[in-house]
Every structure is written in C-alpha cells, then in structure tokens.
Image (cartoon, rainbow, N blue to C red):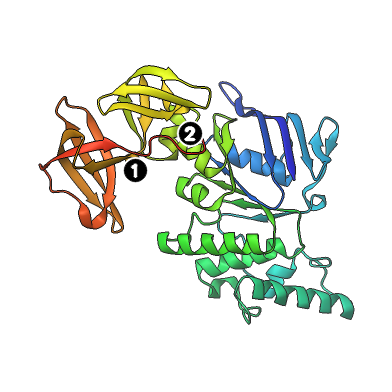
Amino acid sequence: MFEIRGVTRVFPARPEPVRALRGVDLNVVRGGLTAVLGASGCGKTTLLRILAGFDRPDGGVVRLDGAVVAGPGVFVRPEKRSVGIVAQEGALFPHLSVAANIGYGLPGGGRPSLRPAERRRRTDRVEQMLELVGLPGYGRRRPAELSGGQQQRVALARALAPAPSVVLLDEPFSALDAALRVELREEVRDLLARIDTTAVLVTHDQDEALSLADHIALMRDGRVVQEGTPQAVYRAPADREAAAFLGDSVDLPCTVVDADDHGRTRVHCVLGTLTVATSSVDGDTVMLRPEQLEIADSGVPATVCATRFFGHDGLVRLRLDDGTPLRLRAAGDALPSVDATVRVRAVHTVDATV
C-alpha cells in the first residue's frame, strides 16, 4: 500500500541541523496494521506526517497504491491522498455535533448548504459510521458530552467515513487511562480487521505495538533498524538496544560454542550450555527474556532477592551464588518467598520459527 524508499528529512536548527529521518525504507502491507514503534525523537511522527502529506521529504520516494505521492518534483497534497488521520486526542471540532464532525470529511462537508440527495447520502454514511464504532444515536451530541474513549471512536469514524485507502493512527490511545486504553485498542483492531482497512499506527508503547500489529517497524535515530512480525521482532531482536526497548531482558556473559546455518547458536553461560537464536548473541553476551527462565527442581542455585506481584503473574529478582543477577516471570499464585533458595534453569531459548 505505502512503499517508502530512502526517505530523509532535515530540520534547520542551531548549532546543527536535526536529521529526523536518515534514509527510511518501509513497506506497508495492504489490509494489515503496521506499527511504527520507537522512543520519542526517533522520527516516527515525522514519518507519519510525510505519509499524510503534512510535510515534504528532503529526499527519497513515497508511493501510495503504486503512484508516487512524494518524491523529486512530485508532491500530492493531503486531501488528494485518500488517507485518514486519527490524532492523539481526537482533534474533534468542539462547536460541531458528533454527526457534523464525522461528516466533515465527506464530499460537501465544509459547505453550509447541500442538495437533498447529497444530504441524504451524508446522513446515511454518518449513521453507518456511528453503528460501526458502536455509537448509534450519538449524532446530536457535542464532543464535550462524550468520554475520552467515545471521542476517539468518533475520531476513528470521521477518518473512516470517506473510505480512505489507509488510516494513520498517531498514538490515538495515549491520553486514555490504562484500562480504557487496552479496551479501546482491542476494539479498534477488531474493527479495522473486520472492514479490511490498511492502517499505520505510530506509538512508543511496546505492548500496544506487539499486541495490535501484524507488522512492526522499529525506529531509532531516524532509521528503521528492524522490521517483521511482532513475534520475530520480539524473539529475535536486531541488537541489544532493540531487545531492551522491546521488553525486559537478561544479559549474561557467555562463550560461543558453535553456530549453524539456521539462525541458531550454542553458548555456554552460568545457566549451562544453551541453544539460542543467533541474533540474541552479541559478542560475549547472550540476551534472554525473563519468561525464558523458570524455577524448577533442577538447575542453578539462586537466592530470591525480591518479587513484584502483577495479579496474573509476577517478576522474581534473583542472585546466583557468583553474584549474577537474574529476573524471571512466574505465576502470580506461585511467587517464592524473599530470601528463599531456589533452582533456576533456562527454557524455550530458541523459537521454533528460527
């Protein structure tokens, strides 16, 4: 759907220019949800603005449905791109009703008077969108009369009303409380899948990207450093920095024993000899996830230093006899006592798809 090749963007600044994008390459697959994930300042919002047509790249080419929309000598304005936008806090017009907000992007949305046939089509489409986002009967309300989650549903309905080729989601759940954020993002994901709409989600929330996206592009310092399915990006991060950003990790000194041609490497560390994904090894260090460790009847002795209870599970901090710190996840009803001596072993250290 979107094909991005070598896109650069530089902003004038002192003492030196800010290179927001440094040759970004990315494919956005039709019918899927692609999450552009990264920390603040990595360039993801600049990339979104270029896809929307709000900003021009300094170099590179952006194609939408095979047609160049930004490139040398070419720039298609936002209203000509068939792209819908959902902003962080909805960005609804407070003086307009919900129905008027949704209908604003439809043909004739900015005109004070419409022909009867046009008005009927707009009304039918608005009602269809309200049904789609679960807000039938809310058309006459004003944004101030809605909850934060309802406002975001209206913003999504407004973006979808003109039937765009792509919907761009600019951290649309960040202003919501934790429980509502989880609920709404699941609803939005199901809705987009149901109507087979292509979407690009910009977020700094790892859980959000991993749980919602079909495809993840991890950005850092203006570049896409890794892309792939959520499972592949999480289980086989490109480097230690990517691993640390995508979730909790345990770094252990190791010695490489051997490697094969299938992305697997054997290493020796304090937990014994393990077979891991080659991408999990960086020089003399192997990266493991806390869920790849477990307390068992056999393994290396360790002392429990602290536990953190999250309900469904918990995090256990341990220290081996040689002082090596470890972290692992355990069921919430099976957390060990602090100062207890337990045994730890590594499990599931290589993914079946590697």
How far apart are labels 2 and 1 at the CA level? Answer: 14 Å
Residue 213, image x, y percentages: 57, 49
Q: In this view, does 265 lie to the left or right of 30?
A: left
* Circle 2: element type: loop
Q: Earlier in the sequence, mark 2 or mark 1?
A: 2
Give me the residue at 69% from left, 68% from top.
101
- Please provide percent x and percent y for residue 23: 67, 27
**Relative to residue 15, is residue 305 depicted above or below?**
below
Which residue is at the front of the view, 185 or 98? 185
Percent from the top left, x then y, of residue 225?
Answer: 56, 30
* Type of amino acid at the residue the image marks with label 2: Ala
Which quadrant, please, contains the N terminus? Answer: top right
The residue carrying mark 1 is 291
Q: Residue at x 36, y 22 (%)?
A: 267
Checking the image for residue 224, the label placed there is: none
Using residue 327 as the reference point, say whether residue 237 is left or right of it. Answer: right
Kind of residue at disc 1: Glu
Q: Which mark is residue 236?
A: 2
Quarter of the image for residue 321 reads top left
